[in-house]
Amino acid sequence: MSSSAIKSSNVVWHESAVTRGDRERLKSHKGVVLWFTGLSGAGKSTLAHAVEEACFNRACHTYVLDGDNVRHGLCGDLGFTAQDRTENIRRIGEMSKLFVDAGVIVLTAFISPFRDDRERVRKLMPEGDFLEIYCKSSLERCEERDVKGLYRRARAGEIPEFTGISSPYEEPLNPELTVNTGEWSIEKSAAAVLRLLEDRGILRPCERV
Amino acid sequence: MSSSAIKSSNVVWHESAVTRGDRERLKSHKGVVLWFTGLSGAGKSTLAHAVEEACFNRACHTYVLDGDNVRHGLCGDLGFTAQDRTENIRRIGEMSKLFVDAGVIVLTAFISPFRDDRERVRKLMPEGDFLEIYCKSSLERCEERDVKGLYRRARAGEIPEFTGISSPYEEPLNPELTVNTGEWSIEKSAAAVLRLLEDRGILRPCERV
């Protein structure tokens, strides 16, 4: 912790600061953002929650940001035009940066279709704080699953600017990890992410859960 | 933790969720937002950091949101008109809500001059998650300190819509706590906030630090 003194007319108030390093030492793991990107239905949110559960079982402090808790709140004023999507990702990026500074392993699950938007988030943070995880699943596979019925509605023209149908998805060029969510089991997918966290020194290695 | 199964064409993906309660049990303290409000120079940020340090010394997980980490990032696109101030507080409120859900003791230090804006944030959260702490210091005292030289510039007309000079500050009507930061020492002020946290069951009582 660092401190400095502010002298007012009658009392001395010390400015103290608990640092990210202090918080990370308290928790025995580092803060990081795991940025899951991929088509709707590729399994981003499900994978993020599975990784969160595995981290929690190791007493790590995690938080998942996804459409459920962000789209109705912080970004409730934004729609799905290219401009609004960019602002949506910017805000999520800025918020993620603060969660990382708080020492949390933050897992974000958003389509985040545009390469430039993702790169801007990466550049907000020190090298190594942003790990891009591409949840790879073919459009055919995602459309075949169509868990929420969104593809059917998009094909029927009921949802404009739908990624993969009427709006592009730009694949990551150099993600820290590609998970073939369209082919792999959830166990295999989550294990690949945990291995990444160990390799990067975010988590300490332990027996596989 | 709760879980439900999603059945796709070939693999079963379980949807798991680590809850706020899980995180709070892991940390042995509750999540809450301590919303410090008051004039510029009333000592909000200094007090927030002092409380954070005391909480950290009890192994609690805290995070301070203030102008330093929010105004250049998440709210970097906003100015100081009434409309922009309202949007600023809305975003900080929504973000705080997510930090609380993550089980963190989040301390916000913003002038937040308008009663309606603060009430909107309070209503975002379940009862008891939002504790309003009024950092009370007379305009004269704040202006006399003028740590950042802002009052001098505001009086010279260089800063428009400056709270207390050319824009109103609406005092809290029923704050959970009023701290007379204009008169009290930092130790007395921080102790009052810690006592509130104990009384509300956020922290477990222990010997005074």
Image (cartoon, coloured by chain):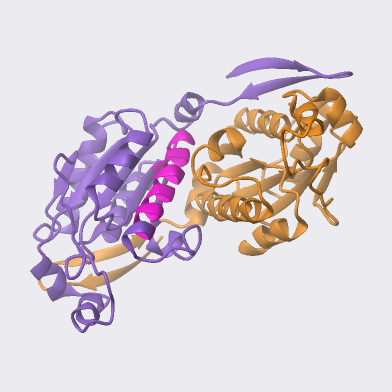
Chain colours: A purple, B orange
Q: Is the residue B149 above or below the residue B193 in the image? A: above
In the image shown, does B83 or A90 lie closer to the viewer?
Answer: B83
Q: Is residue B6 in view?
A: yes
- Which residue occupies the foreground of this view, A64 or B135? B135
Residue B153 x, y percent position in the rendering: 75, 28
Kindly indicate the quadrant of the structure image that contains residue B208: top right
The magenta stretch spans which residues?
A84-105
Q: Is residue B209 above or below residue A122?
A: above
Q: Quadrant of the N terminus of chain B?
A: bottom left
The residue that appears at 47% across and 24% down in the rendered structure is A21
Residue at far bottom of view: A156
Frontmost residue, B183 versus B116:
B116
Residue A206 can be seen in this image: no
Chief secondary structure of the magenta portion: helix
The residue that appears at 35% across and 48% down in the rendered structure is A107
Question: Looking at the rendering, in which quadrant would you find the C terminus of chain B?
Answer: top right
* Picture coordinates of residue A9, whole percent (x, y): 88, 18
- Magenta stretch holds residue A93: yes
Q: Note whether B61 is above or below A41 in the view shown.
A: above
- Position of A191 with respect to B142 (left or right) is left
Location of residue A3 with respect to A192 vertically, above or below: above
Expressed as whole percent of the image width and height from the top left, the position of residue A175 reads: 18, 41
Taking the image as shown, residue A68 lies to the left or right of residue A9, namely: left
Q: Quadrant of residue B110?
A: top right
Assess whether residue B75 is covered by the magenta stretch: no
Instruction: Point out residue B27 in the picture as x, y percentages from the top left corner.
Output: 53, 42
Closer to the camera, A39 or B58? A39
Residue sticking out furthest to the front? B157
Q: Residue at x 48, y 64 (%)?
A: A76
